[in-house]
């Protein structure tokens, strides 16, 4: 006797066919574990289960998975950012505007990233020093074990400081004070966008972000210059 034909459930999202996991994997070239991970992170809706061992996904998930992969690989968005973009897409909003907005606000860097071993080799730091820098929040990679060019530049600077006698713990005040500054910036942004529309919130957040970057650089650098000009070049012992 031949195998009984598969009875596919109705599609709860659109008029397209429902796909079994194997078919979804073949259509997207994304493995089963990754698809299940996306479901657990609420990037994909839960499948329709027809039995304990059989589940079906809307065929529209093929395009959705491809979009997730693009947002990860091309724009390097975090899963939280991708979830926001997908939520807005589901509500019929123009996600290209949101993608452009996120690129500006979060300054995603495109290009190759380094794993821990490669990062240590390129920066000159050993794994123990990297771990210490991570604990002190002097190194802040956007994802675990994936260091970009900004992280590498910081790694080179940290290595130089270590080589010239600066313990990493003596630099930890940067992270402490940065937390305080950012807390104030976020509070200001939240007060500004209160009860504003979606588009107004995007524009105001973008303006606040650009202003924060300018004032951090300008005020801190000018204060440093004024203070440094009052210090002797050599301290007599």
Image (tube, rainbow, N blue to C red):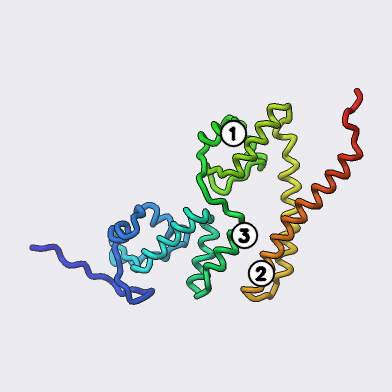
Gap between marks 3 and 1, in whole Å?
27 Å
Eyeballing the image, is 133 above or below 84?
Answer: above
Quarter containing the C terminus: top right
Residue, disc 1: 123
Q: Which residue is mark 2?
A: 203
**Residue appearing at x 42%, y 60% in the figure:** 39
Q: Position of residue 114 (x, y in %)?
A: 51, 40
Disc 3 marks which residue? 104
| Secondary-structure class at tag 3 | helix
Residue found at x 60% / y 35%: 130
| Crowd around label 3: few <14 · some 14–19 · many ≥20 (10 Å) | few
The N terminus, quarter of image: bottom left
Give the Cα distance between marks 2 and 1. 38 Å
Q: What residue do we see at 74% from left, 56% from top?
A: 214
Task: Provide residue 41's location: percent of width, then percent of height.
Answer: 47, 58
Q: Is residue 122 left or right of residue 58?
A: right
Residue appearing at x 51%, y 35% in the figure: 118
| Residue 99 shown left or right of residue 190 in the figure | left
Q: Position of residue 77 (x, y in %)?
A: 53, 56
Instruction: Categorize mark 2 by other alpha carbons within 10 Å: few (<14), some (14-19), many (20+).
Output: some
CB under 8 Å between callouts 2 and 1?
no
Asked if marks 3 and 1 touch (Cβ < 8 Å), the reply is no
Q: Residue furthest left?
A: 1
């Amino acid at each position: 006797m031949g195998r009984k034909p598969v009875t596919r459930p109705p599609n709860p999202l659109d008029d397209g066919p429902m796909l079994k996991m194997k078919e979804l994997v073949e259509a997207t070239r994304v493995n089963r574990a990754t698809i299940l991970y996306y479901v657990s992170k609420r990037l994909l809706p839960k499948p329709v289960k027809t039995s304990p061992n059989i589940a079906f996904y809307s065929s529209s998930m093929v395009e959705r998975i491809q979009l997730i992969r693009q947002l990860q690989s091309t724009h390097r968005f975090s899963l939280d950012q991708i979830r926001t973009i997908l939520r807005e897409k589901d509500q019929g909003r123009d996600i290209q505007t949101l993608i452009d907005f996120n690129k500006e606000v979060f300054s995603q860097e495109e290009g190759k990233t380094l794993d821990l071993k490669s990062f240590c080799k390129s920066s000159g730091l050993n794994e123990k020093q990297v771990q210490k820098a991570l604990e002190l929040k002097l190194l802040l990679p956007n994802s675990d074990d994936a260091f970009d060019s900004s992280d590498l530049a910081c790694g080179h600077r940290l290595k130089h400081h270590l080589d010239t006698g600066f313990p990493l713990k003596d630099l930890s005040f940067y992270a402490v004070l940065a937390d305080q500054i950012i807390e104030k910036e976020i509070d200001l942004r939240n007060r500004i966008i209160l009860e504003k529309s979606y588009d107004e919130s995007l524009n105001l957040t973008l303006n606040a972000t650009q202003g924060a970057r300018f004032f951090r650089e300008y005020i801190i650098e000018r204060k440093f210059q004024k203070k440094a000009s009052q210090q002797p070049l050599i301290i007599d012992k």
